[in-house]
Image (spheres, rainbow, N blue to C red):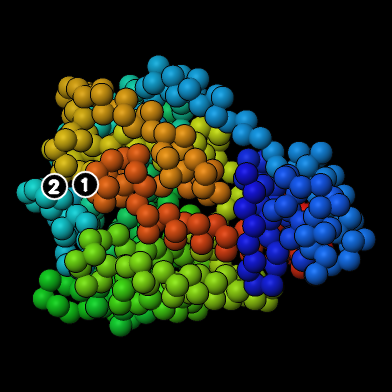
Amino acid sequence: MIHQYKNNGYNIVLDVNSGSVHVVDDVAYDVIPLFEENSKEDIALMLAGKYSAEAVSEAYDEVKALKDAEELFTGDIYEPFIEKFTEQKAKDNIVKAMCLHIAHDCNLACKYCFAEEGEYHGRRALMSAEVGRKALDFLVANSGQRRNLEVDFFGGEPLMNFDVVKEIVRYGRELEGVHDKKFRFTMTTNGVLLNDEVLDFVNKECGNLVLSVDGRREIHDLMRPFRNGAGSYDLIMPKFVKAAESRNQTNYYVRGTFTRNNLDFSKDVLSLADMGFKQISVEPVVAEESEDYALREEDLPQIFEEYDKLAAEMIRREKEGRGFNFFHFMIDLTGGPCVYKRLSGCGCGTEYLAVTPWGDFYPCHQFVGHEEFLMGNVDDGIVRPDIRHDFNYSNVYTKDKCRDCFCKFYCSGGCSANAYNFNGSIDEPYGIACRLQQKRVECAVMIKCALADEGVTAADYGNIEVHC
């Protein structure tokens, strides 16, 4: 499978199955889509109005050499093995990560909150230390030979239950020595309750810190106010700047959401970069179209333009030595995720579970409150193996929209929760998300091409070839 596109002055050709990326001249760019079904002579005739026969012949020979080297028009080596991978994963039933809903409560009233300010379609509650300990016991017992385990403290706002967070971490450190495991804890916070004590603890115990902010003050305060309507930006931002610096601008990211209220979201990304943040994620809202802030099909051209502007600006800043990472443009073209992760995605419902304050298991945080996805609990374990089975056998080859999509090995089929919420099936991807992901991958690959072309060194540019 071949995907071709033009971006920022580059003619880019992506060989989907091998992951090879080629920057080519105009002649080769026009020859490639004709190559497989036409002879060299026929292609020369077809392009006679644009290029000389000699130029077409030379381009044809270069394309043929790339095909012979298995860098273009490569076959799919993964599909024959997906059934074996899936069966082995189902047999192992390994759980390696958990999202602990420490607090189904929040001190903000974010307008787009899928968790309904922490309620998740149900009662407000705080997780007890006992439930947290049982969750870690389940994770250890079901992790097989895997040593490194991930635990996210999530909400609502987890710092509303900070004492329990500390107790769960303390218990986790005890389990490490007994079971030869290593927990990597992550904290997600809106920053309202962030202080020096919390920051010291997080910097000592948490491998990653997620700081929720939407960008510019006016956008953030519009979408992430307190319950009395007052803005939260001025309170949290000094804390976030301090937190990022205290972690040496690594192992954290500021995470925002853009909506129809800020389709010019590149300004929000750059406002965060201008404040010194080096790890940035500003992601599209997922909401029913009836919401006034929801993204719509007609918004896509402007959103695409924003991604292009952001990509070009990131290249410029990288060359000037003041670059930053943007989560959706981070792509590894040499290694990347393991094969199974590329085929089946984030592992929700199989390797990853969300745990409610009262100990119920769901496939991920976005399924919490959907009782049809209640998988079990910390006392009884998994009591609905059929749900795990459905997620285990969901991959890019079971999703019709994914099979012929150039993006499939980068997005791994997209978000199952979004698919279910919009289409009623975890195997029917959410269309707007697909189109945004395709655009982001195109921009991410273009950035790599541009920096490789300029000689900017990086570890993951190894299979980009410039043929111009």
Left or right relative to 332: residue 256? left
Kindly report the distance in space between the C-alpha atoms of the residues bearing marks 2 and 1: 6 Å
Which of 57/48 is in front? 48
Q: What residue is shown at x 89% (from left), y 55% (from top)?
A: 57
Rendered location of residue 226, percent (x, y): 17, 72
Compared to residue 235, the image places residue 90 above or below, namely above
Camera-nearest residue between 181 and 167:
181
Snapshot quadrant of residue 191: bottom left
Mark 2 vs 1, N-terminal side = 1
Looking at the image, is 397 positioned above or below residue 106?
above
Quadrant housing the C terminus: bottom right
Residue annotated with mark 2: 126
Which one is nearer the viewer's eye here, 396 or 234?
A: 396
Residue positioned 86% across, 52% down in the render: 41
Picture quadrant of residue 16:
top right
- Return the residue at label 1: 102
Q: Is residue 183 visible?
A: no
**Residue shown at the point (31%, 47%) measured from the top left:** 419
Identify which amino acid the numbered label 2 is placed on.
Answer: Leu
Q: Please say if the residues under marks 2 and 1 sit with CB atoms less than 8 Å apart.
A: yes
Q: Amino acid at mark 1?
A: Ile
Q: Few, some or many C-alpha atoms within 10 Å of disc 1 (few <14, some 14-19, many ≥20)?
A: many
Residue 202, above or below 196: above
Q: Is residue 206 visible?
A: yes
Q: Position of residue 169 (x, y in %)?
A: 31, 40
Q: Secondary structure at mark 1?
A: loop
> Residue 264: image x %, image y %?
41, 78
452 left or right of 123 in image: right
Circle 2: element type:
strand
